[in-house]
Image (tube, coloured by chain):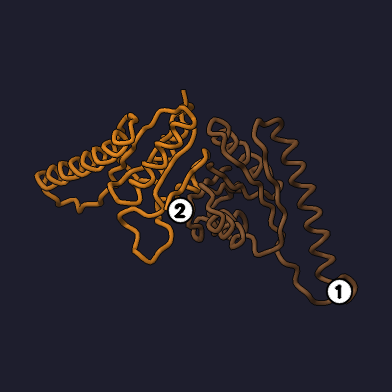
């Protein structure tokens, strides 16, 4: 069975990416996984009060909430959609999940800012197309 | 009926993009359009008309060969495609064409003829993903 991976951060562009992938997956009866990646927190001042584990756990919980919101936003689908929230460096985690689990393609929303802002924003899509061994669908 | 636009330049990665696009077109029940863009060449004003004519002929021949090769791949997979030949800046021309209502999205190879072997992403694919407002699938 074909499987598609979508990187989700809750942005409008990532919801569009989910919609685009669903329009591909539905006629194929393909599997769809929505992946939310929490970047690892940096320890430092404050680390003593809130251990990293706790920070990560609450971020993952937030991710699960975002995933549920995205699912609600795209509405009913005939497909069973898997959702996952994990901790890791975002681009590397998305690319390695797509490659290791042999997804057909990986989709990502792009904030689509211009030439200057692209240095600051939309960097996940930008880096993902550099890193990914699998085809990348960029949706804005 | 929706259309999937495929940017081709005759290179191996662009043919891989063609194969992926055929699969997508079957999933979406979409038509395929293969587009080749002849890039502009700056010539000194003193260039002989004869030279310009020869250059145009050579470019047209290359475009035809690239499009014919790509169409042969499409036909070998049991599909059909329309051919489009454009002149101008490649990424900009493809992005303009993708604005058409009929176009669902664009498929492009991660690297074309011009990319050095060590770069991960060709400049046309990179520019296109930043310019294009429709989904862009980058195939490696």
Q: Is A64 left, or right, of B136 in this rendering?
A: right
- Residue designated by label 1: A46
Q: Colour of chain B?
A: orange
Is residue B134 or residue B56 the one in the foreground?
B134
Q: Colour of chain A?
A: brown
Q: Residue at x 44, y 31 (%)?
A: B26
Chain identity of mark 2? B
Marks 2 and 1, how far apart at CA: 40 Å
Q: Please indicate, yes or no, whether residue A12 appears anywhere in the rendered image.
A: yes
Whole-percent x, y for residue B84 in the image: 31, 33
Image quadrant where one finds the C terminus of chain A: top right
Chain identity of mark 1? A
The residue lying furthest to the top in this view is B1
Is residue A11 or residue B19 the one in the foreground?
B19
Is residue A90 or residue B121 the one in the foreground?
A90
Whole-percent x, y for residue A55 in the image: 82, 65
Q: Is B26 left, or right, of B44 in this rendering?
A: right
Whole-percent x, y for residue A3 in the image: 56, 44
Q: Residue at x 80, y 47 (%)?
A: A65
Give the SS element for disc 2.
Answer: helix
Res. A81 image quadrant: top right
- Residue designated by label 2: B126
Discs 2 and 1 share one subunit: no
Q: Is B54 left, or right, of B99 in this rendering?
A: left
Q: Please indicate, yes or no, whether residue A117 appears anywhere in the rendered image.
A: no
Is residue A119 or residue A8 the one in the foreground?
A8
Q: Nearer the viewer, mark 2 or mark 1?
A: 1
């Amino acid at each position: 069975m074909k499987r598609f991976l979508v990187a989700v951060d809750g942005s409008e562009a990532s919801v569009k990416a989910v919609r685009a992938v669903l329009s591909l997956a539905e006629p194929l009866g393909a599997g769809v996984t929505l992946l939310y990646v929490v970047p690892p927190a940096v320890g430092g001042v404050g680390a003593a009060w809130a251990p990293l584990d706790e920070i990560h756990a609450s971020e993952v919980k937030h991710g699960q909430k975002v995933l549920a919101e995205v699912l609600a936003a795209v509405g009913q689908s005939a497909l069973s959609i898997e959702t996952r929230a994990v901790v890791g460096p975002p681009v590397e985690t998305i690319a390695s999940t797509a490659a290791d689990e042999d997804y057909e393609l990986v989709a990502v929303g792009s904030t689509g800012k211009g030439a200057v802002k692209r240095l600051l924003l939309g960097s996940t899509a930008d880096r993902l197309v550099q890193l990914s061994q699998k085809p990348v669908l960029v949706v804005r | 009926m929706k259309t999937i636009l495929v940017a081709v330049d005759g290179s191996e990665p662009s043919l891989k993009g063609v194969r992926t696009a055929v699969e997508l077109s079957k999933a979406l029940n979409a038509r395929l359009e293969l587009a080749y863009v002849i890039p502009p060449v700056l010539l000194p004003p003193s260039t002989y008309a004869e030279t310009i004519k020869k250059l145009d002929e050579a470019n047209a021949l290359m475009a035809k060969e690239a499009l014919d090769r790509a169409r042969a791949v499409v036909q070998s997979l049991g599909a059909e495609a329309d051919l489009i030949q454009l002149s101008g800046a490649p990424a900009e021309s493809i992005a303009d064409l993708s604005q058409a209502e009929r176009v669902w999205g664009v498929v492009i190879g991660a690297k074309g003829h011009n990319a050095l072997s060590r770069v991960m992403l060709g400049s046309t694919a990179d520019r296109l993903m930043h310019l294009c407002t429709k989904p862009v699938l980058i195939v490696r």
